[in-house]
Amino acid sequence: MSTWDDTISGARLRLRRKAPMFSMLALHATMIPDEHIETACTNGQDIRINPDFWSGLTHGERDFLLAHEVLHLALLHVSRRRMRDTILWNRAADIVVNGMCEAVGLKPIVGSVRDRKLGTLRVEEVYELLEKASASRRRKFGAALGQGLSDLG
């Protein structure tokens, strides 16, 4: 059975072939196993991954997840959020990084937030579009709309 460090190293090495720039970013990121979170997240400095979630992923899914999280770090998504709504900001940031991951041929994890039209925009642009759509839906459908937007960690 592989250890945590072995599986992280494996993902970093596979990324080197698939997405060298993302691999370089991953080499400098601190990965911390954390069983108190559902999937994975970053605080802008470290990447935390639930080891049970990680162990259930295929090699390709691990590569995608690692690239996804290091892009949040590299693009400073945590510090750029400022006073914006956390859930909408995270959704916008996921759309952007998932679009970048797909652009280099990484296959997304099932259930990943994706939008081919928005995936090439800056996170601030995607956020504004989501904010407008959310406000419009709230007016039309009421407060229940906000549920289900918290898939980012």
Image (cartoon, grey):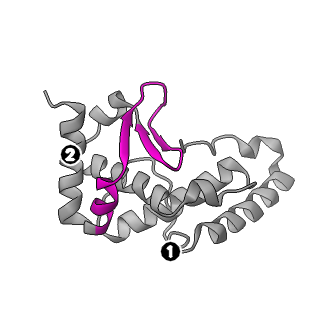
Q: Tell which of 61 and 24 is nearer to you.
A: 24
Residue at far left of view: 1
Outermost residue on the right side: it is 139
Of residues 75 and 52, the one drawn nearer to the viewer in this rendering: 75
Task: Give me the C-alpha separation between circle 1 and circle 2.
Answer: 29 Å
Q: Is residue 106 above or below residue 56?
A: below
Please state which amino acid type lies under the numbered disc 1.
Thr
Residue matched to label 2: 9
x then y, percent, for residue 4: 24, 33
Q: Would you say 139 lies left or right of 115 here?
A: right
Residue 48 shown left or right of residue 81 in the figure: left
Q: Residue at x 37, y 44 (%)?
A: 30
- Within-10-Å neighbours for mark 2: few <14, some 14–19, many 20+: some
Q: List x then y, in percent, for residue 65.
A: 36, 49
Residue at the image position 68 percent from the left and 48 percent from the top:
86
Residue 1 x/y as whole percent = 13, 27
Indicate the amino acid at tag 2: Ser
Q: Earlier in the sequence, mark 1 or mark 2?
A: 2
For the magenta stretch, what is the residue range?
Answer: 21-48
Q: Residue at x 20, y 62 (%)?
A: 16
Q: Secondary structure at mark 1?
A: loop
Q: Is residue 71 above or below residue 86?
A: below
The residue where tag 1 is placed is 120
Task: Determine which quarter of the picture holds residue 35.
Answer: top left
